[in-house]
Image (cartoon, rainbow, N blue to C red):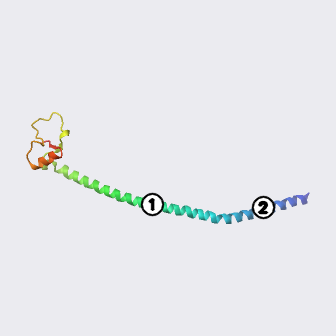
């Protein structure tokens, strides 16, 4: 009985060693394939990251241009807003005139200055 249990134990030990050796060999062989796959994945990611960097640079340039335009429009609006009382009447489109304005309010069509004619050409009227 002891001999049979010893033989079974030895057989299981040999099977364990063979399985361990096969696992080590499989890992060693598979390592190369895994490395090449990982290298391909990393290369693909690098290419995508470079495209993202280019797109972000373009976006940054567009945002800077837009910010410059907004700053310019803001400065112009501030300048126009602060100088409206000193520069003269507020100008608005003829179609935007509120109902009930008197007919004596000058319109672009009946003003004689060159500025009024230019304003009339752009569809603008004086409120004043």
**Residue at the image position 76 percent from the left and 61 percent from the top:** 19
Which tag, 2 or 1, sits closer to the chain's start? Answer: 2
Question: What percent of the width, then of the height, locates residue 124?
Answer: 17, 44
Query: Whole-Å distance between the Cαs marked 2 and 1?
Result: 51 Å
Task: Give the residue at mark 1.
Answer: 51
Q: Quadrant of residue 3?
A: bottom right
Element class at badge 1:
helix
Q: Position of residue 88 (x, y in %)?
A: 12, 47
Q: Name which residue lies at 51% across and 61% down.
A: 45
Which mark is on residue 39?
Answer: none
Say which of marks 2 and 1 sits in front. Answer: 1
Q: Are marks 2 and 1 in contact (CB under 8 Å)?
A: no
Q: Residue furthest top?
A: 100
Q: Is 115 placed above or below 45 here?
A: above
The image quadrant of residue 120 is top left
Q: Position of residue 26 (x, y in %)?
A: 70, 63
Residue at 80%, 61% (x, y): give it: 15
Q: Position of residue 40 (x, y in %)?
A: 56, 63
**Residue with the most extreme left position:** 112
**Which residue sits at x=78%, y=61%?**
16
The reply, left or right, for residue 14 in relation to residue 76 is right
Count residues near mark 1 (Cα–Cα under 10 Å), then give few for <14, some for 14-19, many for 20+.
few
**Residue closer to the observer: 53 or 8:** 53
Where residue 93 sits, quadrant-wise, is top left
Badge 2: how crowded within 10 Å, few (<14), some, or many (20+)?
A: few
Total label count?
2
Secondary structure state at the residue bearing disc 2: helix
Residue 16's label in the rendered image is 2
The quadrant of the image that shows the N terminus is: bottom right
**Image quarter hosting the C terminus:** top left
């Amino acid at each position: 009985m002891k001999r049979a249990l010893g033989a079974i134990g030895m057989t299981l030990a040999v099977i364990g060693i063979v399985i361990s050796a096969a696992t080590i060999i499989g890992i060693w062989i598979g390592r190369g394939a895994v490395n090449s796959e990982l290298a391909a994945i990393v290369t693909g990611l690098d290419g995508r990251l470079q495209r993202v960097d280019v797109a972000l640079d373009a976006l940054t340039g567009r945002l800077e241009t837009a910010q410059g335009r907004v700053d310019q429009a803001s400065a112009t609006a501030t300048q126009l807003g602060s100088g409206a009382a000193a520069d003269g009447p507020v100008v608005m489109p003829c179609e935007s005139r509120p109902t009930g304005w008197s007919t004596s309010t000058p319109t672009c069509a009946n003003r004689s200055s060159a500025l009024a004619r230019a304003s009339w050409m752009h569809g603008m009227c004086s409120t004043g």
